[in-house]
Amino acid sequence: MQQEMAIHQAGSSSESSRLAALASYKILDTPPEPGYDAITRLAAEYFRADSAGLAFGDESRVWIKSAWGKHAREIPRQNSIFNLVLARNGPVVVADMAGWNSPERPIFMLHLLNAAFFASAPVRSPDGKILGVLTIFSRAPRPGLSAHELRTLENLAQIVANHLELRKLRLVSSQRTKMRRAEAALDTSKAWPRRADLRRALDRREFVLHYQPEVDLATGRIVGVEALIRWMDPERGLVSPMEFIPQAEKYGLILPIGDWGLVEACSQIREWNCSDPLNGTLRVLVNLSARQFARTGLADHVESLLIQFGISSRQLGLEMTESSLIPNIHTAVDVLGGLHNLGVVLLMDDFGTGYSSLNYLHTFPFDVLKIDRSFVSRIHEGEQPRQIVRTIIELARVLGMDVVAEGIETYDQFLFLRKLGCRYGQGFLFARPMPASEITNLLRLPGRILPDFPEPCEPALLPA
């Protein structure tokens, strides 16, 4: 009895390890693969058989992964050819089923294929476990296989086994790639700045606004400034928005950060007004994120800030990109209409880089179009980019809008834009973004004319 129990336990352990080996290839829950079809076809043609099949056996079923010839499907493992090969731990060849009366006779499969002859070789794992079988069938009895033929069938089964190993290597490689990507994603999620870093920066008031002058291209006079957010991190120093704005959007903190920027800009407008009444004509441009634009009651919020800080609505400009408007197209007209009624200056930023903006300009009450820096930077490349800039300037003129060209960095860009009649511009050629204190010093200059403006006004270059 003890010996029988030991044999049974050994058999159970062996079957468990076989099933584990089979599972490692992940082949039972996949569709047929061309590589398997090539093997079954080769087996059928080489042996001039009527059909051939490749199957793998789990604990209860035999899964047909490829068949050549007559259709086959998954069958119960009991009384299957797979069970015969597994029990004998080697190939099985039956020349004529009519003369074979074994109780293990695979009636179902042979009836399904109307076969009288079959020969089957095991597909083994590298450590010898039988995972499946490669079998050829003939409708008529035929002589058994010669030693050479049997070896050939086993070699074909070994090709299947080799294919499985390659498959396993690919699976391992794929899993490693996924792990590396997951680790990279984890690193990204842990990469600076984290949500806690941004939240702490808000609480500690580490964000600051720098301002880039907007100038009259005819005179060099400062007419406005664009507020650009920066982060004064105690350890890293001044951090560009390119480093933290994407993370702020990811963590859902762009709204409180954007709101802080709007409040800070309004506060700065009041400070400049108090320092010099002449600054009452200066406009400060603030970029609105898509989340800010989509918020309920934006116009009411802006109105409350104008009242709180006692500033004119014409001193506040709100910049929106096309991409922030179009997803909210059904509400954009109402929101922009409410802001327009307040008298706030509305600017379409990055014009021409997003959607079909030309179709919406007649609907949206914008006051200013900002020519995207990508168009300005390409002015020297040929007629096509220059024509795009001409078109935008002419379109704005027809619609009664002002134009601001962004990213002016060279003297040639400046001259070209001024000749076309572009009224305003900003860029490194005139001034870089700077703290509010430095803007205050510039505003004290006679006539607010930038000292580094490229050249005195030449009448021949001015628009007609």
Image (cartoon, grey):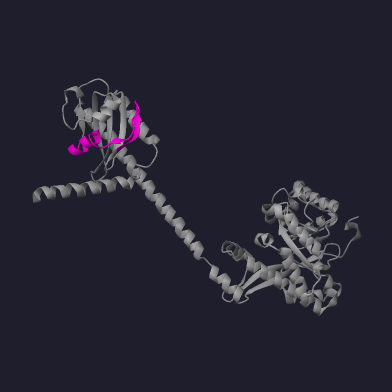
193 relative to 412, above or below: below
Which residue sits furthest bottom? 275
Give the tally of numbered discs.
Answer: 0
Is residue 96 a member of the stretch shown in magenta?
no
- The image quarter containing residue 254 is bottom right
Q: Give the range drawn in magenta.
A: 62-90
Left or right relative to 154: residue 306: right
Please provide percent x and percent y for residue 248: 59, 65
Is residue 67 magenta-colored? yes
Location of residue 461 by image quarter: bottom right
Q: Is residue 176 left or right of residue 255?
A: left
Q: Which of 226 and 445 is in front in this view?
A: 226
- Asked if one can make out residue 322 in the rendered structure from this viewpoint, the answer is no
Estimate the x, y position of residue 385 in percent, counting from the top left. 75, 49
Residue 399 versus residue 90: which sits nearer the camera? 399
Which residue does the image show at 88% across and 56% down from the upper left? 463
Q: Nearer the viewer, residue 67 or 436?
A: 67
| Quarter placement of the C terminus | bottom right
Q: Is residue 228 visible?
A: yes
Q: Is residue 432 left or right of residue 220?
A: left
Q: Residue 272 at x, y = what percent?
A: 79, 76
* The residue positioned farthest toward the top in the image shown: 140
- With 312 as the anchor, is 206 left or right in this view? left
Provide residue 432's location: percent of width, then percent of height: 72, 68
